[in-house]
Amino acid sequence: MDASLSNDDGLVDAAFLEKVLRGRLSEAEARTFAAAGAEIIAFTMLALTQRVAGQQAAGPNTPSAAVPPYAKPTASPRKGQRRRGGQKGHPGVTRPPLPEPDRRRELQLDCCPECQGKLQRTGDTRTRRSEDIPDGLKPVITEDILHRDYCPTCKKRVEPKPPDVLPNCTLGNRTLVLSAVLHYLQGLTISQIVDTFNFHLRMKVTPGGLMQMWHRLATLLFAWYVQIQAECLDSARLNADETGWRVQGKTHWLWCFAGPDATFYMIDRSRGSPALQKFFTKAFEGVLITDFWSPYDAIVCADKQKCWPHLLRDMASVDEKHAGDKVWQSFARRVISVYREAKKLHAAKATTAAVDYDIAAMRLESRLATIAGEAWNHPDAARLAKRLAKYGDQLLTFLWHDEIPSDNNHGERQIRPAVMIRKNSYGNHSDRGMLTQSVLMTIFRTLKLRNQQPLETILEALANYAKTGKIPPLPQKAE
């Protein structure tokens, strides 16, 4: 092989392949490549074919997990990239001080650990505290003696309901809720949960038994599911996103609607308006924050904000292919300039006079409309200009609201835990399992957003249900 085209391993240099792929070879390099032997030309064409196939398979919004490892570019440090670990100026995260101990013990040496000599007692002591799981994790078996008495008014026998176990269940509520948290909040598979209880906690459970208990729990807590939907519809802002899901081997869609302190999941067969109509049972009076998926256009709401990072990722993908095109560079530079100035203006809102701020915001809207209205010869510029013409008034909504971001990051962060669960569970096997998945994921994620302990909160609710026959309202955010 020609030394100018190959590396130390005798293979075609990656930098040379990149130049060929982007069409940036100099005249001298092109002549050298043309004069190379048949072996190096054949290998180069094969490598280019694999590279192009990988780039075509992955779009700008393709999840990282969907891209094969060999098609991912080598990571390189970026200028100004955030360093690992704690950031300068950010408060540290440490464990809080331990509370009063449950037991105390005194430890004293009989002799020196180094020379085994006799010690002289000084009376000096120090204390330290530690926290651990209790020794001998053994299940507690409870036998309830239920007194059955006769009510002459109702003319029937009555008996008390145990506060910590559901009717016809042999596993207590704490086991029920803990196993559901492990599956629907932490993402453990059913086999992992069964192994944890059977092997480590020495409590025999079965996959079928757990599923039946989770179905009953979802039925009891369904009122909270409806309450969370109502609270999302009444919030001032709402992020929405969707991702694929599988039910009985068929493609479904997991919808995520996230407010400031509530997250609602819904699995539906449709990825369009029929699914959105099931959630938006009334006009939404807040600001809806989404990507550019067209079914969101039909939603009636006070205002909408489209996600800037989605647009910028599309532009970055085009820029990789047409970096030297002057028409495209002009379009991209002007759009990015509007975005950067809008972010600066929004950050300086508190220190800018109201009149000056409004004028600057309207000028940015006018600039975006001008870009969208021009005739662009470049096909990708024309395509994205059409998007700006359709959604331009929804890209700068965040300038007119204090609590509205320019991105849909909150919605994507809330849907990500469900995506991780999908990677482990591969979806659901029945419609009932699909509904249970939606209900319990919604409740556990919302409780976590509200700084409420899911285990203790649900145990209290089930104890109240055993006493009164009703589930109390879902608690609000804890301070």
Image: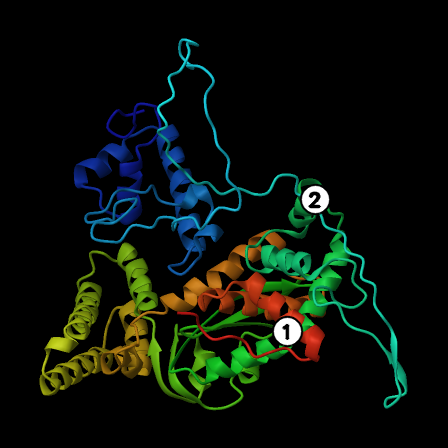
Left or right, residue 79 beside residue 216: left
Q: Position of residue 123 (x, y in %)?
A: 37, 27
Residue 466 occupies quadrant: bottom right
Residue 76 occupies quadrant: top left
Q: Nearer the viewer, residue 223 or 162?
A: 162
**Circles 1, 2 touching at the beta carbon (< 8 Å):** no
Q: Residues within 10 Å of mark 1 (few under 14, many from 20)?
A: many
Give the residue number, with chain letter if any, for mark 1.
Answer: 221
Q: Secondary structure at mark 1?
A: loop
Q: Position of residue 357 (x, y in %)?
A: 13, 82
Numbered circle sitting on residue 282: none
Q: Position of residue 390 (x, y in %)?
A: 33, 82
**Chain-order first, disc 1 or disc 2:** 2
Q: Does the image show residue 5?
A: yes
Three-letter amino acid code at the position of disc 1: Leu
Q: Nearer the viewer, residue 371 or 65?
A: 65
Between marks 1 and 2, how big is the CA–CA gap? 29 Å
Q: Does the image show residue 252?
A: no
Q: Residues within 10 Å of mark 2 (few under 14, many from 20)?
A: few
Camera-near label (1 vs 2) is 2
Q: Secondary structure at mark 2?
A: loop
Q: Position of residue 20 (x, y in %)?
A: 29, 43
Q: Is residue 147 above or below residue 419?
A: below
Three-letter amino acid code at the position of disc 2: Lys
Q: Nearer the viewer, residue 179 or 230?
A: 179
Give the residue number, with chain letter if any, for mark 2.
Answer: 138
| Quadrant into which the N terminus falls | top left
